[in-house]
Amino acid sequence: MKADFRNSPAIDQVGIEERVARFNTRSLKKQTKVDGLKLALSMIDLTTLEGKDTEGKVKQMCNKAMHPYDEIPGLPTVAAVCVYPKYVETAKRVLEGSGVKVASVATAFPSGNSTLEIKISDTHYAVDHGADEVDMVISRGEFLKGNYNFVHDEIAEIKAACGKARLKVILETGELSTLDNVRKASDIAILAGADFIKTSTGKIQPAATMPVTLVMLEAIKDHYLKTGIMIGMKPAGGISTAKNALQYLVMVYETLGPKWMTNEWFRFGASSLANDIILQLAKERKGVYFSKDYISID
Amino acid sequence: MEKEFTWDYAPAPEAKDHAKIKKQYDLFINGEWVKPSTKKYFNTINPATEEKISEVAEANEKDVDLAVKAARNAYEKTWKKMPAKERGKYIFRIARMIQERSRELAVIETLNGGKSIRESRDFDVPTAANHFFYYAGWADKLEYAFPNRNPKSLGVAAQIIPWNFPLLMAAWKIAPALATGNTVVLKPAEATPLTALKLAEIIQDCDLPPGVVNIITGFGKTGAAMVNHPDVNKIAFTGSTDVGKIIQKSIAGTNKKATLELGGKAANIIFEDAPINQAVEGIVNGIFFNQGHVCCAGSRLFVQESVAEEVIQKLKARMETLIVGDPMDKNTDIGAINSKEQLLKINEYLKIGADEGLEMFQTSCTLPSKGFFCKPTLFIGAAQSNRVVTEEIFGPVLTIQTFRTIEEVIEKANNIPYGLSAGVWTDKGSKIFNLTSKMRAGVVWANTYNKFDPTSPFGGYKESGFGREGGLHGLMPYLSF
């Protein structure tokens, strides 16, 4: 397919916001709600990306990833943990055999302001230590300068460096300013070989929002309609309540359809979301809420 | 790969126990509930279940005369003389009471009319309250609205409203009439009288002086008696073009002022540079809002040929996600057709379209076994010469035509006896202004559809009627200068 980045379709912001408001009026109850919550839990990339991260912190989080809340039998594990390259090895060792994947940010996360050599070696480091997935950032400065070919080629280089690991491309939509830019960046990432497109690093506000996510889902849909190729989606940052997670799932379900309703194709990048989902699931079982002290906080 | 995830939203029905509906409704005349002189009552039903909800009185000429006399009396003795600021207070009070009882009104609107609870809750009731709020503010500012023109009220307004937005249309009619100092005799449609009667209760609770607003129920004959009553100064009618023509004939040679808001067959125009995904949403909102029972519905879709295939593919996919069924379920997008009569009319048009050889697409939803329902429908490959394109269907049926140039689409969009509304979708501002200045339609929406606001005038060209409702313009038909 010809890559002409000037031809990304226009986005009408008012229309996007209206559509989002409609998703949020869906009323999910009973089994529908329970199914949705369990699915959301299984889609979480449990994340720690702090300057103060240590092996100890990563190990504890990995344990939480495998055992979100054992008192409810049959709960899924989360999809993956997301850590800095330095902690990939630790995470891989703890999670061995659990089915929980290890995702690593790379490419001079979160700013991306480094050279291509460093970004590629960053990626190699993560993959060589066992990362199943790589979360890269795009060069927003080059994008805003209109240097779309640079952004495209850089993603393609990182994709090549990933080998078998799946590549998630972080657009950092909070820095892109308009929904038209979000759409254009999504199209560039998809054409350059992204397996997933992801909203944010979590370091810039606003992080994931529903309007931004909807624009990206539409880019995925349009690509699928043209080529039959599925691309995954990961909103990250700012999704902390079970209710909000369900609203995202409604949006995915009604925009992309049931094929995307699996952690193969949709993820939440979040740290505190898991516990709110657990609280809601426990409430559906017991009929009452209980103290958050009953749920582990790792 | 695992089994595909299926996610049927569990029923989320709105409770109806808080909606108080009487077993029988009389006529609301002179601030009291009066038995009809016909002694006759007719049933009003829930179109989603075909069950009877209540029965309402049928008014004849005698009752109409009584109501007009009450309105005249209230006009001369109280309302006309009251300081405008005081009149405004009453209208504000009505607006607040509608807000307070919004949940009950929404439930009754849905039970009686078949529209989804989401729409009556999020659109009909709040917009009705807003209309009263807006016109309440004008009541004591008419001198500023029309400086040096000495605006004066007319007297008694006879108002006849349709079944598609019963409460909202009552608000559109009553609010400007009261703000300008007129008194009112209002008749809701025979299919959907309950929210107007509920509004009568609200008006009673507001202590509005007796006779300022009278609400009577009945069929077309009752409406005719209102139009022909010699002591009426103003007719305000929203409904079909056929009835509009009858009204105009019968008031010819009289001094009665009139506004008629009649049918429509709006063009919704998608250019190749439009935000296509949002345009698809706009098409859906344009035609499937309120089951297509909207006079300004975007029922004729024009798509530029270069994007026609993409738009139709996406539209079909989007339509499959529409939930059709129980209007009381909060997840329902498309509720019940308003009446059996209307469903028969829509089905007749579906047959006409199929007989004309058009490609018909209907979504794969299953319709409830009871009640009046219709699947969202497309007629693809339509032309100006098709009957489904030229005649108003007033249901969830969209015709799709393609075009090549802007001149062509303007010509085709205007080539219809109606002229109420239109929609245009393009990312280019200059194209919007070029097109909107040439469209012979009262309302043109750009990159959106079916947006209403009390501050914005609404009304038609040609056979879609005359006179404006809403905004500053909406005051004029109720004033003489």
Image: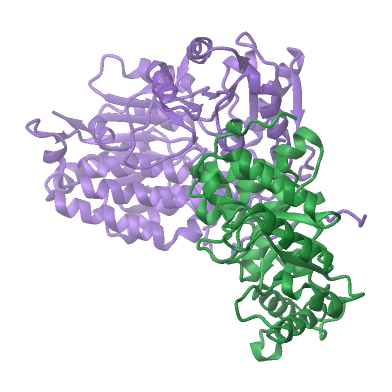
Chain colours: A green, B purple
Work out which quarter of the rendered image holds the C terminus of chain B and state it. top left
In terms of depth relative to the viewer, which is nearer, B364 or A263?
Answer: A263
Q: Residue at x 55, y 26 (%)?
A: B273
| Residue A74 left/right relative to A14 | right
**x, y (%) of residue B9?**
74, 57
Q: Residue at x 82, y 73 (%)?
A: A77
Residue B332's x, y, as percent?
A: 66, 50
The N terminus of chain B sits in image quarter: bottom right
Quick check: B190 above or below A294? above
Q: Quadrant of residue B251?
A: top left
Which residue appears at 51% of the width and 45% of the height? A144
Is residue B8 visible in the rendered structure shown here?
Answer: no
Q: Position of residue A66 (x, y in %)?
A: 82, 78
Q: Is residue A170 left or right of residue B362?
A: left
Position of residue B360 relative to residue A287, above or below, is above
Q: Residue at (21%, 35%) from the top-left corner?
A: B155
Give the percent coordinates (x, y) of residue A64.
77, 81
Q: Is residue A233 left or right of residue A263?
A: left
In the orientation shown, which residue stands out farthest toward the left? Answer: B148
Residue B5, quarter of picture: bottom right
How many marks the image carries: the answer is 0
Q: Nearer the viewer, residue B216 or B448?
A: B448
**Can you see residue B25?**
yes
Q: Is residue A54 above or below residue B257?
A: below
